[in-house]
Image: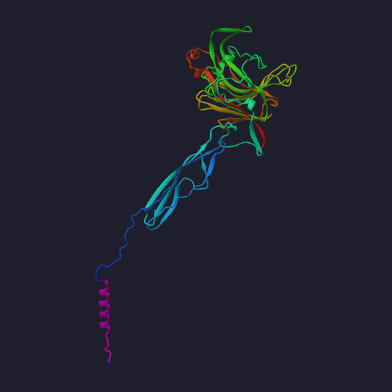
């Protein structure tokens, strides 16, 4: 049997024919473009309430996962991940699902962390809790009052200078009048007034009225005292402080005064030291001059203050004082530490009385302003929403 022999040229022609046959026509495979976006669903918004002394909350949630007709990658592009601490306020969490073709879809949900308002069961501390480890605050009920109803609690408070043991009737021209103290609308109200005609008391002329309220139970070191208070709009004061009795015969010889808050509704003075007294949180410690207190000469004081951006009569403020020790007193405004006195002019180791006095000052004299004749009850009144006293006990 004989085999035909192919020449080299015939071989090339055969290869060319095969190539031409395979490549003839337009049979290229085309990839279809992906235009379908992924899908992703987020949770409903989350709201969490926390105690006022905490500054955020750990929040855990199910992390959204996107899906796609091919494949999708899910990532968080805004907010905080599950299991982390969320700050006070509203945080928007946003998640994105993206596929290989670049199609993407997002979804969002809110996490809102809300601080509680002052609690009737705890001192009002915001963002930080200074309570010592192993201790708890217990309310001193006989020196606390929510001022609900319409009846003044004469078992807890003095409102007459004739019965409070101090016998101070006021600084002229402002006379302390017990009738100016009332309870209504959830407040203890101390209202100022201008008398229709001057009053003579102990040979002294008084033209205006205020009032003074003192606790019957004595305040003492280590305790925390706070009040939610709105100042009146007159030249008269709005105060929250601790007064101490003194007697040169029976003692104590030292005449102390612990001012937690002292302000006025309107300024008429030009004294530089008082230029902020209608928008201030002003605290002070005093050792007043007394003839029998021979350890010092003249009255001594150690003040501290925080100047406010708002008038004291613009809203209710919470003024707090932790009388921590005889030489360390901490002051809180709306639950936050604002100033401290650590060098009082004497050891504050005596017991005193919580005091709320609405009075006149010689450094902020009455002028021709007609607010006493034309002002509303709200304008003329210092309002105490509540007063709360606390002591530390073992847990």
| Residue 51 x, y percent position in the rendering | 56, 37
Main SS class of the magenta portion in the image: helix
Q: Which residues are magenta?
A: 2-23
Report the front residue among 216 and 298.
216
| Residue 376 x, y percent position in the rendering | 48, 17
Report the front residue among 335 and 139.
139
Work out which residue is located at the far right of the displayed protein and give it: 249
Query: Which quadrant does the C terminus fall into?
Result: top right
Question: Is 156 situated above or below 113?
Answer: above
The reply, left or right, for residue 276 in relation to residue 21 is right
The reply, left or right, for residue 391 in relation to residue 379 is right
Report the front residue among 266 and 296.
266
| Residue 18 x, y percent position in the rendering | 27, 77
Query: Looking at the rendering, which quadrant does residue 72 occupy?
Result: bottom left
Query: Looking at the rendering, which quadrant does residue 361 occupy?
Result: top right
Q: Is residue 356 visible?
A: yes
| Residue 255 x, y percent position in the rendering | 69, 20
**Picture residue at 63% right of the left edge, 36% below the top:** 131
- Indicate how the structure is coloured in the image: rainbow
Query: Which quadrant does the N terminus fall into?
Result: bottom left
Is residue 32 one of those drawn in magenta? no
Work out which residue is located at the far bottom of the displayed protein and give it: 1
């Amino acid at each position: 049997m004989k085999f035909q022999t192919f020449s080299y040229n015939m071989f090339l022609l055969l290869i060319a024919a095969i190539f031409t046959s395979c490549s003839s026509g337009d049979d290229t495979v085309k990839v279809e473009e992906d235009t379908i976006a992924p899908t992703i669903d987020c949770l409903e918004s989350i709201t969490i309430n926390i105690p006022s002394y905490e500054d955020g909350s750990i929040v855990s949630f199910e992390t959204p996962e996107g899906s796609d007709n091919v494949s999708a990658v899910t990532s968080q592009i805004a907010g905080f991940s599950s299991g982390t601490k969320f700050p006070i306020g509203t945080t928007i969490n946003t998640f994105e699902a993206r596929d290989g073709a670049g199609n993407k879809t997002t979804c969002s949900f809110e996490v809102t962390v809300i601080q509680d308002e002052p609690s009737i069961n705890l001192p009002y501390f915001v963002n930080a809790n200074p309570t010592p480890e192993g201790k708890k605050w217990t309310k001193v009920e006989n020196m606390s009052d929510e001022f609900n109803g319409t009846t003044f609690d004469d078992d807890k408070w003095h409102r007459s200078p004739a019965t409070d043991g101090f016998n101070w009737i006021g600084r002229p021209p402002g006379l302390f009048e017990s009738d100016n103290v009332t309870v209504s609308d959830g407040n203890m109200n101390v209202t100022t007034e201008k008398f229709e005609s001057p009053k003579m008391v102990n040979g002294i002329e008084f033209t205006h009225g205020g009032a003074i309220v003192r606790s019957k139970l004595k305040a003492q070191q280590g305790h925390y005292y706070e009040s939610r208070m709105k100042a009146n709009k007159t030249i008269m004061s709005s105060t929250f402080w601790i007064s101490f009795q003194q007697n040169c015969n029976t003692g104590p010889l030292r005449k102390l005064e612990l001012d937690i808050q002292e302000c006025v509704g309107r300024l008429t003075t030009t004294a530089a030291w008082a230029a902020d007294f209608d928008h201030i949180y002003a605290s002070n410690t005093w050792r007043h001059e007394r003839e029998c207190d021979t350890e010092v000469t003249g009255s001594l004081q150690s003040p501290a203050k925080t100047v406010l951006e708002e008038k004291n009569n613009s809203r209710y403020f919470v003024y707090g004082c932790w009388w921590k020790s005889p030489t360390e007193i901490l002051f809180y405004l709306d639950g936050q530490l604002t100033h401290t006195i650590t060098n009082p002019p004497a050891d504050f180791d005596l017991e005193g009385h919580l005091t709320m006095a609405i009075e006149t000052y010689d450094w902020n004299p009455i002028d021709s302003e007609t607010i006493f004749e034309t002002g509303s009850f709200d304008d003329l009144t210092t309002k105490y929403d509540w007063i709360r006293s606390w002591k530390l006990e073992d847990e």
